[in-house]
Amino acid sequence: MNQEHRRRRPRFPQRRRALRPLICTAVTLATAAGGVVASSGPAAAQPTSSTSAFNSLTVQSHPDWMAQVPDNTSLGAMSIPGTHDTLAIHGGWAPWAYEAQEDHGDSAATLTAQLDAGIRAIDIRVRVVNSGTAFVIHHTDVYQNANFDDVLTKAQAFLAAHPTETILMHLHGECDGDSTEGGSGSSSIGHCADDPGNLTAAQRIAVFDSYLARYPGLFYAPTVTGNSTSDMPTLGQARGHIVLTDFTGPVGEIYAGFGLTQLTSGNWGQYIENDWTQCNLATKFSEAQANLQKSSADTSGALYTTYTSANCTPFGAGPADMAGGYFGGEGENQRLLDYLNGGGVTHTGEIMMDYPGYAVVSAIIGLNP
């Protein structure tokens, strides 16, 4: 459900992946305003966003911003800056495995930098290793020099130092047991050559349960029961904890009994915008803006999630191109900053970004009560 760059949560309730090369060939033909598609990834990015909007996350620090928000505020009524593919800081030989975030260090040091800067929604992609006993962090078939213990240790330390805060975590199985693209022993289309095989949901859940046992109290308990999903908590209920929003498998299958009910059952797709193959800059932002307007108008307490990220490599724009702009087209991050600064938005829900700049994070935070 929450997989990218080939396997991200789609806009509609469909959890199977599409093969990027076929889609991106068509995308490269788009030539609407700001929509000429670049031919490669971050190295070819020609940012037209200001540095305050793009690739400058740690210029400002917001480690305790949630302290100013009342306890009785529903998480669904908040504006929460987030990162898509949070620890994708290393690329690989595969053209779909470009970096998506600023590199502030391995072993989840990048996560600490993001949290200190104000990021509160994270997108963690885990692969099963060590004979099915542990999670490591991957972006497709590329190991990101971090393990799930690193993520939880860094998150735990941050929350201990800043107990007024909470972290929303989207947890997704990456790579392991994914036999739908590339057969056993293959590394095509992001499939790991040394996959342990088709692991069952129960096996992956057992690995996650082992982490829950080693980090008691770290997660907001109603989201990790394994038996039932959680109502939307208030910030007061969630302070000091990780709220697991959803836990999904390598092809987007939902693992029952984990996460928030709103994001794991029923018509969950109505709350999410993630057209990850749309690499026309103007069109992509118009889709994101429509979801932000829905969030702003909502009074039900639903948590909306908007992805400003997209990736059409190897034949089109990469994450940095989309976030920072290219060929004179204004990047998604600058468009977002301008839109938020224009007024008229009450709350955004989660905004999951690539290469966010400090001013974008500050603008999202500033919308909270």
Image: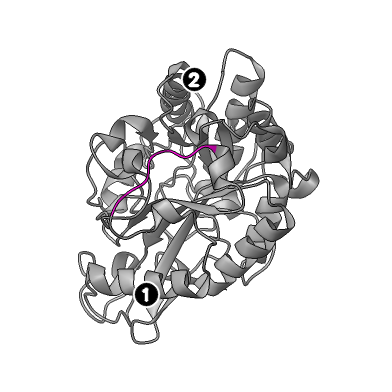
Magenta part of the protein: which range?
Answer: 228-234
**Residue bearing the label numbered 1:** 207
Q: Along the horizontal axis of the image, is 350 left or right of 60?
A: left
**Residue 53 shows up from this direction:** no
Is the stretch drawn in magenta largely helix, strand or loop?
A: loop
Q: Is residue 232 magenta?
A: yes
SS class, disc 2: helix
**Residue 322 shows up from this direction:** yes
Q: Which residue is farthest top?
A: 344
SS class, disc 1: helix
> Looking at the picture, how far across and down is residue 163, in whole percent?
68, 51
**Residue bearing the label numbered 2:** 296
Q: Along the horizontal axis of the image, is 173 left or right of 202?
A: right
Q: Along the horizontal axis of the image, is 58 left or right of 42?
A: right
Q: What residue type is labelled 1?
A: Val
> Looking at the picture, how far across and down is residue 290, in whole percent?
42, 21
Residue in the image at 27% along x and 77% along y:
186
For residue 299, the mark is none
